[in-house]
Image: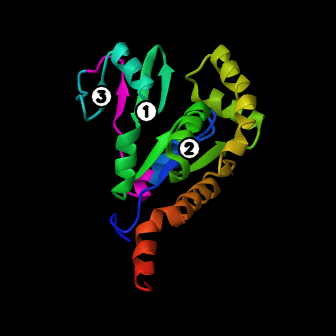
Amino acid sequence: MNTVDRKGIALIICAPSGAGKTTLTKRLLSEFPRFVFSVSYTTRPPRPHEVHGKDYYFVTKEEFSNLINENYFAEWATVHGNYYGTPLQNTINTLADGNDILFDVDVQGARQIKASLKNLGRYVFVLPPSRRVLEQRLRSRGTDSDEVIARRLSVVTKEIADAPLFDCVIINDDIKTAYDELRSAYIAATLAPVCRSHFLNDLLKQWS
């Protein structure tokens, strides 16, 4: 099937830091070029190489607040004092054109997207096999202090409690197995009736 044969799917992936989400998503994006980049809004200043409308839409905090009040975003969050948000209508249009979008967000962002996109998303939660393994992974990076690692570990319990929000839970003990499961979850999502509504409607007309 090409991009005109079905609606797109929003794949929302959440994971605690150190669970291996980045590695998994890079593999998925490499294998499936149907995913497109969603241009977000932000209140942080542009970096020298960044282009407005291509990398981000750069707006003031006042403009961003107004957009929040207008329910303009599928999801938004505050990171290090700056706002970031994904425009809802652009997302809907992209999916209607048959393109898929991957969201790398936290649980709060996943909740917002679920409220915005209804049944157009597949929600995947990637978890480590144990607290011990997660701590080992965080320490092996060599980039975080003990304080930062402790803070990251402390929020995992709260994140795990939100697991029922998701459609799939992947335990990343073995990266190959975890990727096979993520790949399967994505492919299964593209087979949902909502993605193939055009085909179903056209087929029904043949009996009318």
Magenta residues span 29-47
In this image, 167 relative to 191: left or right? right
Give the residue pinned by disc 3. 57
From the image, which quarter does the N terminus lie in? Answer: bottom left
Horizontal side of residue 34 vs 124, given as left or right? left
Residue at left offset 50%, top offset 47% = 25
Location of residue 57 by image quarter: top left
* Disc on res. 122: none
Q: Are marks 1 and 2 in contact (CB under 8 Å)?
A: no
Q: Is residue 32 highlighted in magenta?
A: yes
Q: Quadrant of residue 142?
A: top right
Q: Amino acid at mark 1?
A: Phe
What SS does tag 2 mark? Answer: strand
Work out which residue is located at the far front of the displayed protein and give it.
Answer: 208
Q: Position of residue 63 (x, y in %)?
A: 33, 18
* Residue 141 % position (x, y): 58, 29
Image coordinates of residue 54 in percent, x first then y, are 25, 35
Q: Which residue is mark 2?
A: 13
For the C terminus, which image quadrant? bottom left
What is the CA distance from the residue labelled 3 to the residue labelled 2?
23 Å
Instruction: Residue 138: give x, y in percent of width and height.
Output: 64, 29
Helix, strand or loop status at disc 3? strand
